[in-house]
Amino acid sequence: MADLGAESAVMFPWSPFSGVWQRTVDHLLPGGTSPGQVVVEPYLVNSPEAMLRTVAAGAGVAPGILGVAEHMGVGGIVVRPLDPPLLLDLEVVWRPPVRSAVRHLVDLLVEAVADPAVLVSAPRRPAAR
């Protein structure tokens, strides 16, 4: 990631994703940022495509969800996985009683952890004290 230090990062809006946003910027630019080095694409509804089009226009590099960019139909970009990968610990939260769709999602995620072809891993929670 240190190779990206001179690049601009094209990002999705900070709000409502401040935690993910900051972790992503810190991962892409571990040496810190300079004024104007982070370009925010303000159109949240079309954010993935808008970010890719901004990159295609020459504005810098952008993070993306693995497998999405190839299907967006935006030319003039190169897609590569991050090395090292950016890992984000996410949780699923719901209100009881559990509905069948939520139960299905939880079952799917639990099964995915055991499948090496799926990019989901078990949580890395600190041990209880």
Image (tube, grey):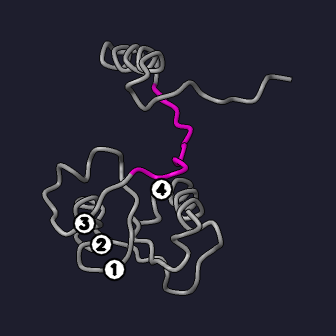
Q: Say if mark 3 contacts mark 2, CB within 8 Å.
A: yes
**Residue designated by label 2:** 55
Amino acid type, residue under disc 1 in the picture: Ala
Q: Which residue is mark 4?
A: 17
Q: Dividing the image into 4 quarters, which one contains the N terminus?
A: bottom right
Q: Amino acid at mark 4?
A: Phe
Q: Give left or right: position of 46 versus 128.
A: left
Please give the count of numbered marks on the rendered protein: 4
The secondary structure that dominates the magenta segment is: loop
What amino acid type should be assigned to the residue bearing mark 2? Val
Look at discs 4 and 3 and give the one toward the viewer. 3
Which residue, given by chain and number where applicable, does mark 1 sit on? 59
> Is residue 110 in the magenta section?
no
Which residue is painted at 22% across and 61% down in the image? 49
> For the residue labelled by badge 4, is the local secondary structure a helix, a strand or a loop?
loop
Amino acid type at image mark 3: Ile
Front of the two marks 3 and 2: 3
Q: CA distance from mark 1 to mark 2?
A: 5 Å
**Residues shaded magenta:** 81-94
